[in-house]
């Protein structure tokens, strides 16, 4: 019986993916084979000897001690794209709220109190000019980061009649195919900042994106630019945003990550981390995370890992071993020698590496017993090994 520890509230549709005859699932499962998590922090103490993988039902993994998991051979999954539509819709809402003072207008009307129809009409007509806004059609939208969410935002911008610029130095082939041809690719961030009326951020939090939007880059924006951040809190310096708002470089800042330095400003709109908070997004993320866990535990396949290489091998026999090792020479030869010494014939195999870690799947003509697995584990540089027998 495989044991799955759930942290946070996981959508039922995802939990139902686990066959109950093979999986024990719960929020108080000791020593699990896998952890399914949303926002709870996973420190190194969760990296037990039995734990094989962690799946984050969402895109960001900043709440997970990824490096510690990698050292222990634990695969960390995320669910890229599963919540993309939800975040896209939040960003479009943010853009529209920044263009028209809808929030101020709603507050004004609700503050009028009990008036008769004539007086209500008079005051509304007299004061509506205070909340006048601008159309976004014909404006220029700059999208920083052209992955699953950024490409959707770019597409909607085009459909709303905007000119769309995009910048992503690390764009993948798949993302490039998804991107509408009408999006104009910028060669550097400064070119995008200087030509955009609206800037929407969609980059992950990495060492080179922390503080990406700072004083220097905000000075490159055209006066009156709207900045939207529904990506990650730390990629924007809030004190720099305050200075840019005071100087008129920014007219509005809309973010899903409230910052103490900016709360209460009339030119700032904060939402309480609602970007992916829809039932559909939570369901999609839970289903994708569950399916990735199942395929990994039962077949050894890896999809959407943030610390291990993607690797999928169709079954040729029912007997398979999976092992990870440090990416150093002759590791695979050492393992194959152990298999040969025990008269185990290799039917098929696949090996891939990512940075300092390598991962391998080997199909055999018969099962590898505990003694064989112990010999492989003892090889210097092997992180972990397990038998993945078909059910």
Image (tube, rainbow, N blue to C red):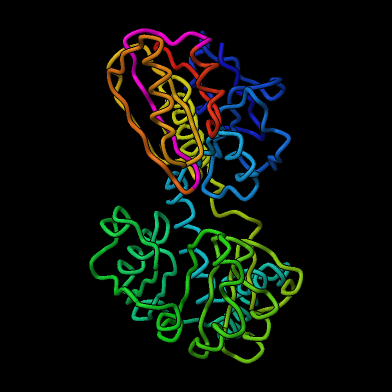
Given residues 66 and 192, the one toward you in this image is 66
Q: Which residue is found at the position 32% from the left and 77% from the top?
A: 163
* Location of residue 96 in the rendering, given as x and y in whole percent from the top left corner: 48, 70
Image check: 299 left or right of 177?
right
In the rendered image, which quarter contains the N terminus? Answer: top right
Q: Is residue 123 above or below residue 56?
A: below
Q: Which residues are magenta?
A: 356-371
Task: Please give the count of numbered marks on the rendered protein.
Answer: 0
Q: Give the quarter of the figure containing the C terminus.
A: top left
Tell me what residue is drawn at x 38 percent, y 79 percent.
140
Observer-nearest of 66 and 162: 66
Q: Is residue 224 above or below residue 358?
A: below
Res. 317 image quadrant: top left
Is any part of residue 391 visible from this angle?
Answer: no
Q: Is 184 left, or right, of 11 in this rendering? A: left
Say whether residue 118 is visible.
yes
Q: Is 72 within the magenta? A: no
Q: Quadrant of residue 318?
A: top left
Q: Position of residue 227 (x, y in %)?
A: 53, 75
366 in the magenta segment: yes
- Viewer-nearest residue: 114 or 5: 5
Residue 143, how many percent across, how many down? 42, 70
- Residue at 61% of width from left, 26% of height from top? 51
Residue situated in front as seen by the camera: 366 or 246: 366
Q: Position of residue 233 (x, y in %)?
A: 63, 63
Extreme residue in the left direction: 181
């Amino acid at each position: 019986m495989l044991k799955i520890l759930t942290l946070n509230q996981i959508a039922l549709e995802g939990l139902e993916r686990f066959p109950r005859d093979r999986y024990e699932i719960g929020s108080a499962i000791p020593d699990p084979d896998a952890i399914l998590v949303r926002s709870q922090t996973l420190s190194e103490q969760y990296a037990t000897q039995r734990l094989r993988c962690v799946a984050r039902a969402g895109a960001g993994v900043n709440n997970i001690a990824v490096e510690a998991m990698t050292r222990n051979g634990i695969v960390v999954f995320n669910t890229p794209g599963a919540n993309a539509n939800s975040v896209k819709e939040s960003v479009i809402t943010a853009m529209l709220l920044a263009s028209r003072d809808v929030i101020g207008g709603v507050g004004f009307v609700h503050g009028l109190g009990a008036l008769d129809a004539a007086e209500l009409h008079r005051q509304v007509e007299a004061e509506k000019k205070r909340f006048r806004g601008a159309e976004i059609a014909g404006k220029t939208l700059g999208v920083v980061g052209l992955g699953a969410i950024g490409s959707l935002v770019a597409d909607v911008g085009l459909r709303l009649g905007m000119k769309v610029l995009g910048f992503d130095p690390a764009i993948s082939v798949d993302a490039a195919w998804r991107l509408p041809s009408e999006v104009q690719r910028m060669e550097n961030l400064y070119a995008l900042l200087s030509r955009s009326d609206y800037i929407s951020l969609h980059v992950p939090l990495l060492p080179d994106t922390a503080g990406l939007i700072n004083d220097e880059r905000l000075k490159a924006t055209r006066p009156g630019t709207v900045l939207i951040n529904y990506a990650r809190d730390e990629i924007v310096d809030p004190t720099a945003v305050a200075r840019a708002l005071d100087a008129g470089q920014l007219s509005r800042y809309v973010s899903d990550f409230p910052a103490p330095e900016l709360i209460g400003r009339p030119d700032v709109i904060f939402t309480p981390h609602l970007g992916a908070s829809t039932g559909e997004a939570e369901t999609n993320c839970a289903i994708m995370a569950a399916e990735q866990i199942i395929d990994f535990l039962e077949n050894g396949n890896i999809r959407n890992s943030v610390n291990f290489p993607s690797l999928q091998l169709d079954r040729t026999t029912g007997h398979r071993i999976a092992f990870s090792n440090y990416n150093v020479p002759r590791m695979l030869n050492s393992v194959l020698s152990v298999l040969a010494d025990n008269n185990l014939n290799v039917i098929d195999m696949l090996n891939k590496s990512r940075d300092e870690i390598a991962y391998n799947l080997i199909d055999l003509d018969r099962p590898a017993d505990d003694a064989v697995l112990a010999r492989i584990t003892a090889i210097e540089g092997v992180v972990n090994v397990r038998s993945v027998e078909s059910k």
